[in-house]
Amino acid sequence: MSQIAYINWEATGTAAFPLIQKAIRETPTLAHLPDLLHINTPNTIPDTLDVSKVEIVIVDASVVGLWSRFPSLKLILSAWAGIDRLLKDPDFPRHIPLIRLVDNSMTKRMGQIALTHVLNHHREMNLITRQQIQKVWNKKPRGVLPPPMEDVQIGILGIGVLGKEVASQLIRNGFTGVRGWGTVERSLTIPRLVDSVTGNETAVVEEVSVQVVAGREGLEHVLRTSDIVISLLPSTPDTYHLIGYSEFSKMKRGSMFVNLGRGATVVQDDVIRALDDEDAMIEWAVLDVFELEPLPESNPLWSHPHVIVTPHMAALTDYTFAARTIANSLRLYTEGAERIPGLVDFSKGF
């Protein structure tokens, strides 16, 4: 009978523990498993605690240097969607299957926050908010009306599960000029309800094509042709500091850059440099993630007039939903399923 350990060293993880235990108990094929072994001693595992028979670890912490304590380990389940902190550990056992959290509710919230920032920029709410602080009454901050929504060109960097949801929510709400950048070139088709007839259950559905490009040339094409660039890139060796001054300089004048992915994908100092440069192209930056979190109070991003800082809250985890997802991943694994959502490809880093 498999022994399962749940490791966490933060208050949020402690709150999740009973939910995960309950979800496993309520899964018929897992109900026979022993109670979770809860390890919440900060940054260590007590020598008095025998974990030699633990075969499955559910981790909500960065277990640096402690993996050798689990000689019987067969599976690791991450309570995080992002796994970069785990993979940074040189001793992480990459021969052991790792399943990251795939949270559908979190995916929808990511789409919502991306749409919010796009609408705010399109309807000039960023400028309107500044006008309120300055007590300025001006209905057209730029002197003209915003362009039609379908004319706004939006590039999405990272077109996986999150990117597809962001594209879908943008298109369904009228922003049809969406393109993407990913690991392979392809074309996505996203349905959009464009009309309905009163008293008739039928509706007119339009299929919108989203072209996804790849490679360096593809990245530069998306940057050059987009009014708004939304980054959802994961943190991998290939994406580390991928976006810097050179990339910002290729963007359209007056454009906006939104980072909802990982802080390490962007050269943070280059954001301010790009905004303040005389030849600056980007006009606004929305940053939800940073290399160092929380963002230090002394960081100039806090006070820059054209930067919107949010505290890594674009898509917070719903622990009740996450617990059910973890239990389902564990069920699929124990049943020998060929495909498990979130199973990590170590060669890609996600």
Image (spheres, rainbow, N blue to C red):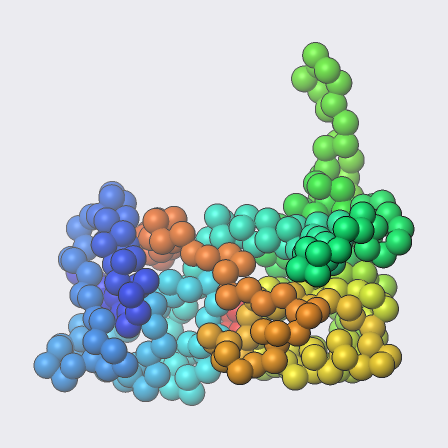
Count the labels in the image. Answer: 0
Residue 161 placement (x, y as % from top left): 58, 55
Please identify the residue farthest to the top as the structure is shown.
199
Residue 101 placement (x, y as % from top left): 43, 59
Residue 134 left/right relative to 94: right
For the N terminus, the quadrant is bottom left
Please identify the residue farthest to the front as the structure is shown.
135
Please, is residue 199 above or below residue 282 in the view? above
Q: Residue at x 41, y 68 (%)?
A: 98
Please identify the residue farthest to the right as the structure is shown.
144
Residue 227 placement (x, y as % from top left): 81, 61
User: Can you see residue 53?
Assistant: yes
User: Which image quadrant is residue 253 in?
Assistant: bottom right
Q: Residue at x 22, y 71 (%)?
A: 40
Residue 350 left/right relative to 5: right
Residue 193 placement (x, y as % from top left): 72, 33
User: Can you see residue 216?
Assistant: no
Residue 184 left/right relative to 27: right
Q: Residue at x 69, y 78 (%)?
A: 271
Please, is residue 160 above or below residue 52 in the view? above
Q: Residue at x 30, y 69 (%)?
A: 10
| In front of the other: 264 or 34 | 264
| In front of the other: 98 or 148 | 148
